[in-house]
Image (cartoon, grey):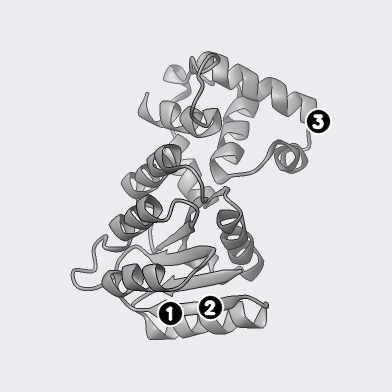
Amino acid sequence: MRVILADDSTLLREGLVRLLTEEGHDVVAAVGDATALLAAVDEHPADAVCVDVRMPPTHTDEGLPAALEIRGRHPRLGALVLSQYVEKRYATELLTGEMTAGGGGVGYLLKDRVVQVDEFLDALERVAAGHAAFDPKVVRQLLARSTHTDPLARLTEREVLGEMAQGHANAAIAQRLHVSCSAVEKHINAIFDKLELTGTTGYSRRVLAVLRYVGS
């Protein structure tokens, strides 16, 4: 896997370069700001970019518009965004970007998850393969709501939607929730029905389900 890294922390950036190299991946560029990231993406063929949300010059959200621009210019390139905190707006924009851009995968991971090496590598490999990879903490905040107004009041349906939002396929969801694949399929169909997505075509209903739920 060919990776481009963007983080203004030299220590973290070099640590990620070493980690990925030791795992057999090729870090084709490692930069410290969004401008350099966009230039690196145009210059170096890659499978995925790993981008910090907060970078120079303002250290607010430079990484997010850069990630979205990359997905527009290079739709097959996976983008994994790192953030210190759960920021619902950023995660929702990335999900929306996934729905409209197509092609490469997208992910949102909290920085403290990077120290869980296997989880970080799995997330990066998933976005490079064209799938979603959202931090469980991010998903919980996106899907948090009162059961009194919840169209998916059954616990298992909400759990399945949460696993879908993280980017897991049906077989993985079944294994993680200790249910059968047929049960997962039934819950997903129920989710589509309740969120009025049964007849939808042209977009990923899995992504639309999360967006519809978050926006309702």
- Relative placement, left or right, of 171 versus 41 is right
Q: CA distance from mark 3 to mark 1?
A: 42 Å
Q: Residue furthest right?
A: 180
Instruction: Give the residue at x 43% y 39%.
Output: 142
For disc 3, the marked residue is: 180
Against 185, residue 91 (above or below) is below
Q: Label 2, on which residue? A: 27
Q: Position of residue 202 (x, y in %)?
A: 49, 26
Q: Which mark is residue 48?
A: none
Determine whether label 2 and label 1 are within 8 Å by CB: yes
Q: How many labels, in total?
A: 3
Secondary element at image label 3: loop
Q: Earlier in the sequence, mark 3 or mark 1?
A: 1
Quote the CA–CA distance across marks 2 and 1.
7 Å
Q: Which image quadrant is residue 164 in?
A: top right
Q: Mark 2 is on which residue type?
A: Val
**Image location of residue 116, percent across then percent down:** 61, 68
**How packed is label 3: few (under 14 Cα within 10 Å), some, or many (20 or more)?**
some
Q: Which residue is mark 1?
A: 30
Residue at x 62% of width, y 75% of height: 25
Question: The residue under label 1 is which amino acid type?
Answer: Ala
Disc 3/disc 2 C-alpha distance (Å): 39 Å
Check whether the beta carbons of the residues at disc 3 and disc 1 lie within 8 A of each other.
Answer: no
> Residue 70: x and y, percent?
37, 57
Q: Secondary structure at mark 1?
A: strand
Viewer-closest of 178 and 44: 44
